Image (spheres, coloured by chain):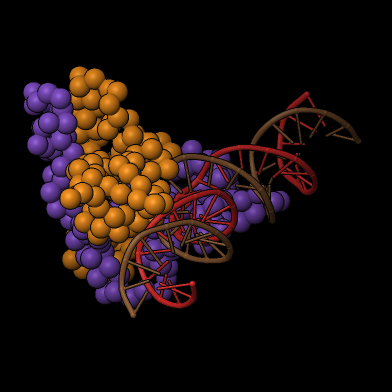
Chain colours: A orange, B purple, C brown, D red
DNA sequence: CTGGCACTTGAACCGTGGTTCAAGTCAACC
DNA sequence: GGTTGACTTGAACCACGGTTCAAGTGCCAG
């Protein structure tokens, strides 16, 4: 009757490893809904949460930030502001990567010899000037 | 008469820290053109190389890969193939980030309450399914 | 010639995100 | 009731890209 999932099931269905799931638990990102003996048992809803965690990771949030993001705490308004800010940052990152991609493409195709003579060879104009 | 730069000059003019420059040297990415006493002295050409290193980092190459990339070794053809491949990878990354940015923007603006009810809240369709 | 300051070194440490390992627990099948 | 195999734990280890530290060296100013 119980719909509970094994850690291995959750791993398979989420695309994460069991060790990553235990790691996330230690970090306070997730928790098991029950224990069967010593074994973690999860309700299927965990999968939604894990999808969100993966999406947030892909958006560039750190695990610590995601913990905040998915906590019960933050008011929607604050949350939306955070997401909007991250959207802007991601956008800037996209712009940078686009310039870089164009540079790579150019240099892959141009006929300068040696390659290092190409004026576009690994020359990204406008990298942030501070220490990254 | 010598145009040689101090490590601090290079740091200032490249946007890197002296410790990063020494780190790069240990990794075989750069070397000093001379020593004045114990101190490293660089010809200004180092700045071009450092720009390339920063561009390549921004393109997602690891320092080890950059060492290869900037070595005297690789034939232009092989090099161009590498750059083309990285261009494709960066492009895929851009596509993913674009989807994520759109999701973030949407969720920042929609009026679902609570936010977690929004069907687009941190839901990236098509994240690579394997372990990242 | 002497002091101060910027440099030098190697080694240790950091944050991020995990993986790997040894040793132990436990449910289930034969 | 004993073996197997998947889970458990804590601790150590990994890669990556650096930063920080203590201790030492040496250029240049006064």
- Closest to the observer, A56 or B31: A56
- Closest to the observer, B98 or A8: A8
Q: Position of residue B45 (x, y in %)?
A: 45, 53
Using residue B104 as the reference point, say whether residue B60 is left or right of it: right
- Closest to the observer, B130 or D5: D5
Using residue B58 as the reference point, say whether residue B23 is left or right of it: right
Q: Residue at x 21, y 56 (%)?
A: A13
Q: Residue at x 23, y 25 (%)?
A: A79
Residue C1 higher or lower than A123, as above or below: above
Q: Position of residue B9 (x, y in %)?
A: 53, 40
How many marks overall? 0
The quarter of the rendered structure image containing the C terminus of chain A is: top left
Q: Position of residue B38 (x, y in %)?
A: 69, 51
* Residue B69 found in image quarter: bottom left
Q: Position of residue D23 (x, y in %)?
A: 79, 44
Q: Residue at x 33, y 57 (%)?
A: A17
Q: Is residue A14 visible?
A: yes
Residue C6 higher or lower than C18, as above or below: above
- Closest to the observer, B75 or D4: D4
Q: Is residue B91 visible?
A: no
Q: Residue at x 9, y 25 (%)?
A: B112
């Amino acid at each position: 009757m119980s719909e509970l999932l094994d850690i291995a099931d959750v791993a398979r269905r989420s695309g994460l490893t069991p060790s990553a799931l235990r790691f996330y638990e230690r970090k306070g990102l997730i928790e098991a809904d029950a224990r069967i003996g010593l074994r973690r048992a999860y309700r299927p809803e965990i999968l939604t949460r894990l999808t969100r965690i993966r999406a947030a990771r892909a958006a560039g949030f750190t695990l610590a930030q995601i913990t905040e993001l998915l906590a019960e705490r933050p008011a929607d308004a604050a949350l939306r502001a955070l997401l909007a800010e991250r959207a802007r940052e991601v956008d800037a990152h996209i712009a940078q990567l686009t310039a870089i991609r164009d540079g790579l493409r150019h240099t892959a195709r141009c006929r300068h010899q040696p390659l290092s003579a190409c004026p576009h060879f690994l020359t990204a104009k406008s990298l942030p000037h501070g220490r990254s």
